[in-house]
Image (cartoon, rainbow, N blue to C red):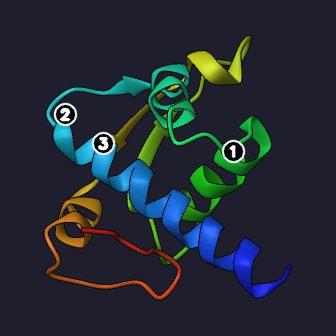
Amino acid sequence: MDKLDLAKAKELRGEIIKRLYDCYVDPVRIVSVNSLLRYKGYYSKDDIKRAINYLTGPKKEFIHVVYNEDDYWNSFIQLTPAGINLAEGNITDMGVLFHE
């Protein structure tokens, strides 16, 4: 992965956290997040899936996923307390980039 791809991956993770923070009280379907991010123009479903895997990974756990066994994209995701802290800037992660 080159530096540009790495920066885009970090930015995508930050975008997912921001979108979930905007509605953090309620779980959101992954397909809805995908639709919101599509307007950014360069995120594929594979990119989004990798970003979600990163954000739910061990020692990260910024988001919680309730998987739909029949359709991944209809699974629900929601910020965890750590994800809220990340969105509010109380903690940082070098793999997540936020743009103002």
* Three-letter residue code for mark 2: Cys
Which of the two labelled residues, at mark 3 and mark 1, occupies the earlier sequence position?
3
**Please, is residue 14 above or below residue 77 in the view?**
below
Which residue is at 63% across, 66% downward? 9
Residue 20, which numbered label?
Answer: 3
Q: CA distance from mark 2 to mark 1?
A: 20 Å
Query: In this view of the protein, which residue sits in the foreground, 77 or 94?
Result: 94
- Could you tell me how far apart the alpha carbons at marks 3 and 1 are, in whole angstroms? 15 Å
Identity, as a three-letter code, of the amino acid under mark 3: Leu
| Rendered location of residue 16, percent (x, y) | 43, 49
How dense is the environment of label 1, judged by Cα within 10 Å: few (below 14), some, or many (20 and up)?
A: some
Q: Is residue 68 left or right of residue 30?
A: right
Quarter residue 98 falls in: bottom left
Measure the C-alpha gap from mark 2 to mark 3: 5 Å
Q: Residue 68's image quarter? A: top right
Which label is found at residue 49?
1
Q: Quadrant of the N terminus?
A: bottom right
Q: Nearer the viewer, residue 65 or 45?
A: 45
Give the secondary structure at mark 3: helix
Which residue type carries mark 1? Lys
Tell me, yes or no, whether the two marked residues, 2 and 1, touch with CB atoms within 8 Å: no
Q: Residue at x 31, y 85 (%)?
A: 92
Q: Position of residue 54 (x, y in %)?
A: 61, 64
- The residue under label 2 is 23
Percent of width and height locating residue 55: 51, 61
